Image (spheres, helix red, strand yellow):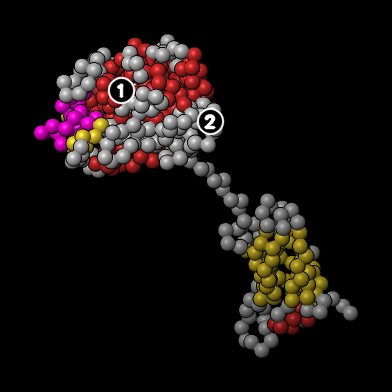
Amino acid sequence: MKLLSGLAAVALAATTLTLPSSASAATTDPTQRADDWIAAELTDGLAVGQYGADVGLSVDAGLALDATGRADTAAAIGDAIGSRLVTSDDVPYGYVSSDEGGQVGHYANATAKAAAFTQRIGRDAATAYPAVDLVDQLETLTDDATGVIADDSSFGNYANTIGQAFAAEALTVAGSAEAGAATAALLDQQCPAGYFRFDLAATACDADEAAPSPDTTSLAVLSLVESGDTSAAVTTAIADATAWLESVQRPDGSLEGDASAPGSNANSTGLAAWALGSTGHDAAATKAAAWVRSLQVADAGACASQAPTGAIAYNPADLTEARSAGIAANPTVRDKWRRSSFQAAPALLWTPAAATTLAISTPATAVEKTSVTATVRGLAAGEQACVSLGTDVRRVVGTGSDLTVTFTLPAGAAARTFTVATLDGTATSTTSATAVPPVVTPPAPAPSVGELSAAKVVKVRKNRFKVTVACDATVACAGTLTVRTAGKVKVPGMVRKKLVTVSERTYTVAPGGEKRLVLKLTKTARVLVADGPLKVRAVQKAKGAQRSVTTFRLKAAKG
C-alpha cells in the first residue's frame, strides 16, 4: 500500500463498530497487545521518527487506539498534536499550515485528516486548537462549486481521494454547508466496478480505466460510515465498494495493495477488514482479520524472538527478518512496522475465537528414534503458537481446526514431553519412548560337506574314477575331497612306505541335490592301481563343517 505520511489510516469510533457477538471474548488479547505496542511507540503522545515528531503518523496511532477502545491514549495524542499543526517559533513546519518562505501554505489532506481525528475523539474540530480552526480552513480548501479539496501551497497540489474522504467526513460531522459538495466529489471518485481511485479529479470516474486502490476504497467506506450520512447515494456507494473489496479478497483472507505495492500486506488487508466489518460483512472481515493476526508478533515459549510482541508486520518476509534482527536498530524498518501496525490494528477487532481450549496430544508410547505426530487443538485462525520437543522447535499458525506437527524422538528410553505455547498459556503431552527392540539374527545354518556315496570297489577307467556326493542340508554342501591310500604303501623306487595321495578336488552341491564327481589319479596312484586293488580313504572337509571319511577300494577296469 502507499505509506502516505499516515494518510492511509483510519478507524471508526468504538460506538459505531458493528462487531460480531463474540468479539469481546475473541479479540481482547490481540487488540490489547497491538494497542500496548502502539502506545509504547509514542513519546509524550507523539510518534517520533528519525526526522522528529511525525504528526500524520501520530494521528494514525490515535485513530487506531480510538477505534480499539484506548480513548485516553487517543486523547493524549489529540493534545500533543495541537502545538504542531501550524508553524511557530518552536515548530518550523506545521502539519496543516506552514511558512513556505514567502507565503503560508495550507494542506488539504492534512487538514481533513486532523479534523476527522479530532471529531472522532469527541472534540469540535473548529475550536479544539487555538492556533487553527480546522473546519474553517478545510472549507477554504474545498472548492465551492465542485466540492473537491486542493492544497494552497507554493509546492503544488497533492490532495488525493484519501484526503477527500476525510474532508467529506469532517465537513459532514461539522454540519458544514460544503459537506454535500465534498461528499458528492468523493462519490465521483468511485469507478463503475465499485472501487475508489486514488488520484483525485474534478470529473467523475465513468469507466474502470483508473488503477484500482483497495486502500483508498476501504478508507472511503470508513469515512462515509463515520460521517453518518445515510442518503441513498452514500448507502449505494458503500454497498458497491464493499462488494468490490470482497471480490478481490484472496482465499486466504488477504488483499493486495495497489499497483505501487503488489502482494498481500497487512495494511491493505487490515483496512479492508475494518471497512467490511464496520458494514456488517463479518465473514469476509473475519477471514481478513485472521490473516492480519498471523502477522502479529506473538512469539511464545521456545519461539521467543527479537521481533516486538504485539506489533504487526507488513508481510511474512518482514516478520521473518524481524524475528532474527529486531526492528529497533534500523529507523526505516521501525517506521515501516509502525505504519503497518497503526493502520492494521483495528482489524483485530474481528479476529475469530478458538473453538476449544488449548491442548496437545501425542501417542502414549512410541519407539525411540521414530516419528511421532503431535495434534494441537484450540488455536484460533491466525493465532500463533510454538510447538516443541526439547530443542526441536516449530512455529505454527492456527487455522481454527486441529493442526498436526511431526517430530522424531531422540534416542533413549525416556518420557518425552511435547509442549504447545501461546502468549496466553501452555499445554503439554507426554510420550513414553521405549528402546528399539534388539535385532535377533538367527544362527547361520551349519556348513556341510555332504555325504559321499561310493561302491566297495570303484573301477578306474583311463586313470579316472567316479563317486557321488549327496546334499541333504538347507545350504549348499561344499568342501575339498582328498583321496589317499588307507595306509602306508610301498612306492616303486622308494625304500620306505608312505601315504600316497590318490586324487583331490573341490566341489559344491546344491541343497537337496547330488553331484557325480570325476577324480583323476595322480601318477604314483596309477602305478599302485595297476599292481592290483588299492584300498583308499576319501576325506571330505570344509571350514566349520564336520569332516567325513569314506573307505573303499580302487580297481583297474579290464579291457
Q: Name which quarter of the figure residue 412 lies in.
A: top left
Q: Nearer the viewer, residue 74 or 306?
A: 74
Callout 1 secondary element: helix
What label sits on residue 139 in the rendered view? 1
The residue positioned farthest toward the right in the image shown: 559
Q: Quadrant of the N terminus?
A: top left
Q: Earlier in the sequence, mark 2 or mark 1?
A: 1
The three-letter amino acid code for the residue at tag 1 is Glu
Asked whether 27 or 257 is in front, the reply is 257
* Residue 81 within the segment the image draws in magenta: yes
Q: Amino acid at mark 2?
A: Asp
**Label 1 Cα neighbours within 10 Å, binned few <14 / some 14-19 / many ≥20:** many
**Of residues 403 and 529, which is closer to you in this image?**
403
Magenta range:
73-98
Q: Residue at x 70, y 82 (%)?
A: 524
The residue carrying mark 2 is 206
Say if residue 104 shows up in the picture: yes
- Tell me the distance, in whole angstroms, between the alpha carbons under discs 2 and 1: 27 Å
